[in-house]
Amino acid sequence: MNGNTLVIRKDENADDQIKLDYVAVKTAAMTLRAINHKLRQQIVKLLEENKRMNVTDIYVKLRLEQSVASQHLAILRRANIVITERDGKFIHYALNHARIANIAHFVQELVNSDTETKSARRAKAEATGENAPVAAEATA
């Protein structure tokens, strides 16, 4: 393994391994940060309503400075959340629906996994009579 991957054994006697690629984690975090911003969420909503827009249409509609709109569109573009199409001197932006669907699926899997883990801990704690840590977790 290289320095960008952490390998964890599920059980010291098992051959099962969990491989955590730090580069992939960084990419995923960048993507989630890109979409987890109010202004960028407004841009995504606007693009969903209008299907395709250029930066001028976006900054006029949202009452922004052109540079601000361009910076946020660049972040969305780097995260592959929007796609671009050049039409002469204009660049039109549209949503990358496949990418957004992948992000939504990933987030749902992450949330479901966390919920399942907490449920398993809660069930184990109830079975062994250890309720204090689970109660604190439920409020977190």
Image (tube, grey):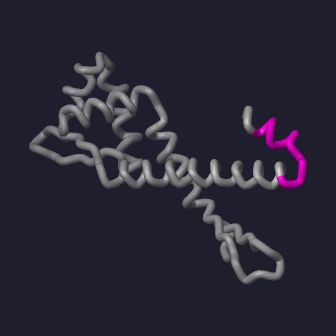
Q: In this picture, is 16 found above or below 60? A: below
Residue 27 placement (x, y as % from top left) = 52, 54
- The answer to whether residue 133 is left or right of residue 45 is right
Is residue 132 within the magenta segment? yes
Residue 14 placement (x, y as % from top left) = 77, 81
- The answer to whether residue 104 is left or right of residue 97 is right
Q: Quadrant of the N terminus?
A: bottom right
Residue toward you, 96 or 73: 96
Residue toward you, 112 or 82: 112
Is residue 126 within the magenta segment? no
Q: Quadrant of the C terminus?
A: top right
Spot the residue most to the top. 63
The residue at 51%/46% (across/down) is 30
The residue at 72%/55% (across/down) is 120
Spot the residue most to the left. 88
Residue toward you, 121 or 93: 121
Q: How many marks?
A: 0
The residue at 29%/20% (across/down) is 62
Q: In this picture, is 70 found above or below 87? A: above
Q: In this picture, is 86 found above or below 66? A: below
The residue at 90%/48% (across/down) is 129
Q: In this picture, is 139 found above or below 78? A: above
- Bounds of the magenta span? 127-137
Q: Image quarter for residue 15?
A: bottom right
Residue toward you, 9 or 24: 9
Residue 67 placement (x, y as % from top left) = 34, 26
Residue 10 placement (x, y as % from top left) = 75, 71
- The answer to whether residue 100 is left or right of residue 37 is left
Dominant secondary structure of the residues highlighted in magenta in the image: helix
